[in-house]
Amino acid sequence: MHRRLAFIDTLRGIAVLAVVVQHALEVIVREHPTGAYHAFLHDAIGYYMNFGRFGVVLFFFVSGFVIPFSFPASASPINDFAISRFFRLYPAYWASIAIGLVTMQAVMSRTYPLSQIAANLTMLQSFLEVPHLWDFYWTLTIELLFYLVCIVLFAAGLLHRRLTAVAIVVATALAGTAVAGLVEHRAAWVVTEVGLNLSAMFLGKIIRDTVIGGSLRWRHVALCTTLYVLFAVTLSSKRHGGIYQDDFFYSYSVGAAYVCAALVFIVFAVVGEKMAWRPIAFVGVISYSVYLMSPFAMDCVHHYAWPGDGPLAWFVFVAEVVTSSILVSFMTYSLVETPSISFGRRLRSDRSTPVAIEPALGRQGAAQ
């Protein structure tokens, strides 16, 4: 059995809490009078740093650190990987759709076309050119795409070649920076942003290969991180630049999110288990459910338990959102995620723990 790494769970906890706090603060700024505090709150989460994007990109780094090493040493590694990922993602995702539909009907009397719901059940709605039921589902499309790329590379015998990830990040960053700098077309920038997110994932693998695998050196990390930062800053200035308004996405905030996520991840990877913090690591364990359920918990809190206006009330609101999200997510983690993962494990040919070094509490020594 392979041990798990607590600092990875801590990173997941930080990531999902950043997303939840960003969304809660956006509700305050968008929907309530903030008076003299408006500029401070608005700029803090929109102009200087988008904490939601920071959290999402941190998740991408963690995926790159873990997912390429999740192919089990079995007779059918690709099949077993696909089964494992399916039961890891889809049941909780379907539960979030059900909870979301009920919540939107109860809180906002909002319904959705049956065709849109059906397409979203596949998690392939982006490829089918059908709108997401809720915007935060976009990250799952990136995850699925990364899984597909990993499967192709694994089948070709390239996934664990020493310089494969380095070549991908270098090529993607150079091409993406060129497109962002030279092409004046919004659709091209949107597609290029997918490449930036995949670059973050493969950079996570490069860091893992350096810190734990020992197959790469820090010069590889330095080169790829530099190109990734250049890519992120250039694309953000084009994709989210211009006049700053109320969408909370601006070149500074998004570029800062990508850069800070890389720096935070590198620090945690270097220091290892000393960076693990049990309370945040616990949130990291249930972070997928928190990510999926927190928007609906927030809608309920906002509708039924709004504490009022003013700094203290806003702090209470954020605390209510975080607390209710964790409570609801612990239930879905216990009742949906855990049984689904266990069931999927029984369907795999190896029926054992996958090769990945997964996160858990109470272990020391990231590089051991």
Image (cartoon, rainbow, N blue to C red):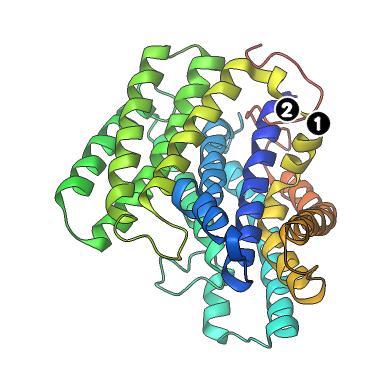
Q: Amino acid at mark 1?
A: Arg
Of the 4 image quadrants, the one containing the N terminus is top right
Q: Residues within 10 Å of mark 2 (few under 14, many from 20)?
A: many
The mark lying in front, picked from 1 and 2, is: 1
Q: Residues within 10 Å of mark 1 (few under 14, many from 20)?
A: some
Q: Position of residue 46 (x, y in %)?
A: 48, 54
The vertical placement of 185 against 149, above or below, is below
The numbered mark at residue 6 is 2
- In terms of depth relative to the viewer, which is nearer, 79 or 282? 282
Of the 4 image quadrants, the one containing the C terminus is top right
Please tell me which of labels 1 and 2 falls first in the chain. Answer: 2
- In terms of depth relative to the viewer, which is nearer, 182 or 357? 182
| Residue plotted at (25% across, 43% down) | 176
Name the side, left or right, on which 240 lies relative to 122. Answer: left
Is residue 162 something one can see in this rendering?
A: no
Q: Position of residue 215 (x, y in %)?
A: 45, 13
Name the side, left or right, on which 252 lies relative to 10. Answer: left
Alpha carbon separation for disc pair 1 and 2: 8 Å
The vertical placement of 27 against 201, above or below, is below
**SS type, badge 1:** helix
Q: Amino acid at mark 2?
A: Ala
Q: Position of residue 207 (x, y in %)?
A: 48, 23
Residue most extreme to the front: 36
| Residue plotted at (58% across, 42% down) | 81
Q: Are marks 1 and 2 in contact (CB under 8 Å)?
A: yes
- In terms of depth relative to the viewer, which is nearer, 209 or 25? 25
Where is residue 222, by image quadrant?
A: top left
Q: Position of residue 355 (x, y in %)?
A: 63, 28
The numbered mark at residue 278 is 1
Is residue 240 something one can see in this rendering?
A: yes
The vertical placement of 367 against 359, above or below, is above
| Residue plotted at (73% across, 25% down) | 276
